Each structure stands twice: as C-alpha cells, then as structure tokens.
Image (spheres, helix red, strand yellow):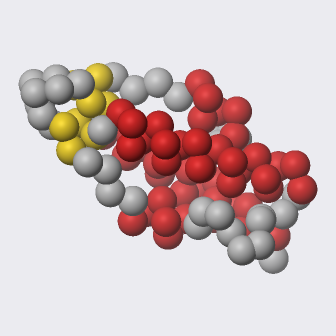
Amino acid sequence: MAAILESSDIDRARFSTTKFREGYSQTGVDDFLRVAKQALATHEARGQLSTPPTLTADDVVNVRFQPTRFRVGYDQDEVDEFLDRIVVALREHTAAAG
C-alpha cells in the first residue's frame, strides 16, 4: 500500500504536458494544488483539519479544470491520478480527526 500523500509531495508533483491533444490548464491545476497543499499542511501541523475545512475530498472529486487544445496543458490522466491520491489523503485526515 502506498504511503498517504503529504503536503510536501504536492511540491514534487510533475505532470507530462500536452499540446496537440486536450489537457488541463496548467494555471488552474497549479492554483488548485496550492489550495490542496495548504489543506494538507494545516492538518499535518495541527493534527486536525481546519474548521471549516478549506478543502474537502468532495471538492477535489468535483473540481473541473479548463481544457486546453493547441496550447500547452497538463496530461489529464496524470492529474486525475494525483487528485485521487489527494482525495484519499483528505479522507484519511478527516477520519483521523473524528
């Protein structure tokens, strides 16, 4: 079983880029990952979720990014897989916080 994602893992995330097929807006993904990093860092520092939570697992599941085509974007499958790891981490933190 893979280790639970930590906020520092978000800094190390790298995604392949697309240009001639649909991808996700790099700016949109990067902005969202900053919010996710802060949410995870808050839990790691305090041992609890922020109240009210700044980001929930449902927020991650429901996020939609601007698609790109004919301009550089991030590979959608890679981003989606990473978002799945964020969902798992947030659910684990929520369960641990009670």
Q: Quadrant of the C terminus?
A: bottom right
Dividing the picture into quadrants, the one containing residue 52 is bottom right
Image coords of residue 15 (percent x, y): 40, 26
Image coords of residue 84 (percent x, y): 47, 51
Side of 55 relative to 60 (left or right) = right
Q: Residue at 89% of width from left, 56% of height from top?
A: 46
Between residues 1 and 26, which one lies in front from this camera angle?
26
Between residues 8 and 71, which one lies in front from this camera angle?
71
Can residue 78 be seen here? The reply is no
Image coords of residue 94 (percent x, y): 71, 68
Q: Residue at 76% of width from left, 46% of height from top?
A: 41
Q: Residue at 59% of width from left, 25% of height from top?
A: 12
The residue most toward the right is 46
Dividing the picture into quadrants, the one containing residue 90 is bottom right
Q: Quadrant of the N terminus?
A: top right
Can residue 20 be seen here? The reply is yes
Between residues 1 and 29, which one lies in front from this camera angle?
29
Side of 72 relative to 39 (left or right) = left
Side of 12 relative to 69 (left or right) = right
Side of 87 relative to 7 (left or right) = left
Q: Residue at 39% of width from left, 65% of height from top?
A: 62
Image coords of residue 71 (percent x, y): 17, 26
- Eyeballing the image, is 60 above or below 76? below
The total number of labels drawn is 0
